[in-house]
Amino acid sequence: MPRTRWTVCAGIALLATAIATAASPGDAAAGEILVAAAASLRESAVLIADTYEATRPGSRALLTFGASSALAAQIRAGAPVDVFLSADPRIVQQLVDLGLVADGDSFRFAGNRLVVIRASDRALEISGPRDLLRPEVRLIAISGRAVPVGRYARAWLESVGLDGAFEERVALTEHARASLAAVELGHADLAIVYATDALAARSAVVAYAIPDSEQPAIAYAAARIADSSHAEDAGAFLAHLRSDAVRAILSEAGFEAAASEGRAP
């Protein structure tokens, strides 16, 4: 059976509708899990799900994507998620604190970097952080503070003394992929996104590669939801995330090794 793919940005009703569309109650099969993943993992998560299914006959991993903060809100509201792949270990820890993820059932599995992007047909030259204040930079797409990439972006801006310096120019977005789309569609001049989003771009390029000395610590964390009705299969998916095949997928997509081993954060 081909995998059903959908995108969820916010709202439990939307997720419930997607699940109802994917399968009727009588069609639910043993070995089927729902994986809620950060939007920046989109292409990699599809490949990871494919390799998981290939190594576990009879299994099926359904995927839903969105901002990690929005997906966590859906989990708190009772969404039937089995595995959560978050772009911020802090969000996973919040679920642990609420008892929605068992202590010890989460770990970091990847890292990332921030970059500033522009449309490939724009000649904006950005050689340092203060160039973001140039008059020709009218709008900069940045996600809200509750979204991991937004928090990371603001941590960088604060570290270089620019936090709040151009709030009137900020075009708020739901997640990193929405910031990328804003640049590619011409709705923003620049965007602060993950390096992996820049690699996946169709008509955007890196305008400024933020140096190592200014990079915030970015980590992705995986977790099995405590009340999953497919706990064994969810555990198998987490185990698959530690495999060489998944490490190769993530590396090819531009992700880095996790900032630290062990449980999140």
Image (cartoon, rainbow, N blue to C red):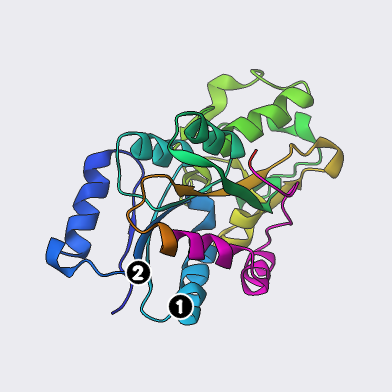
Residues in magenta, as a range: 234-263
Figure quadrant of residue 142: top right
Amino acid at the residue labelled 1: Arg
Figure quadrant of residue 164: top right
Position in image of residue 171 (x %, y %): 49, 32
Q: Is residue 120 visible?
A: no
Q: Is label 1 in contact with label 2 (beta carbons under 8 Å)? A: yes
Q: Is 148 placed above or below 5 here?
A: above
Is 56 displayed left or right of 142 in the figure?
A: left
**At 54% across and 20% down in the image, what residue appears?**
168
Q: Which quarter shows the N terminus?
A: bottom left
Mark 1 / mark 2, whichever is N-terminal: 2
**At 53% across and 56% down in the image, what residue appears?**
41
**At 43% across and 62% down in the image, what residue appears?**
232
Compare residues 251 and 174 and report the one nearer the observer.
Answer: 251
Compare residues 122 and 30 and report the one nearer the observer.
Answer: 30
Q: Is residue 40 magenta?
A: no
Q: Residue furthest top?
A: 164
Q: Which mark is residue 31?
A: 2
Instruction: Residue under label 1, please give it.
Output: 56
Element on which disc 2 rests: loop
Q: Is residue 65 visible?
A: yes
Is 61 displayed left or right of 224 in the figure?
A: left
Element on which disc 1 rests: loop
Q: Is residue 252 magenta?
A: yes
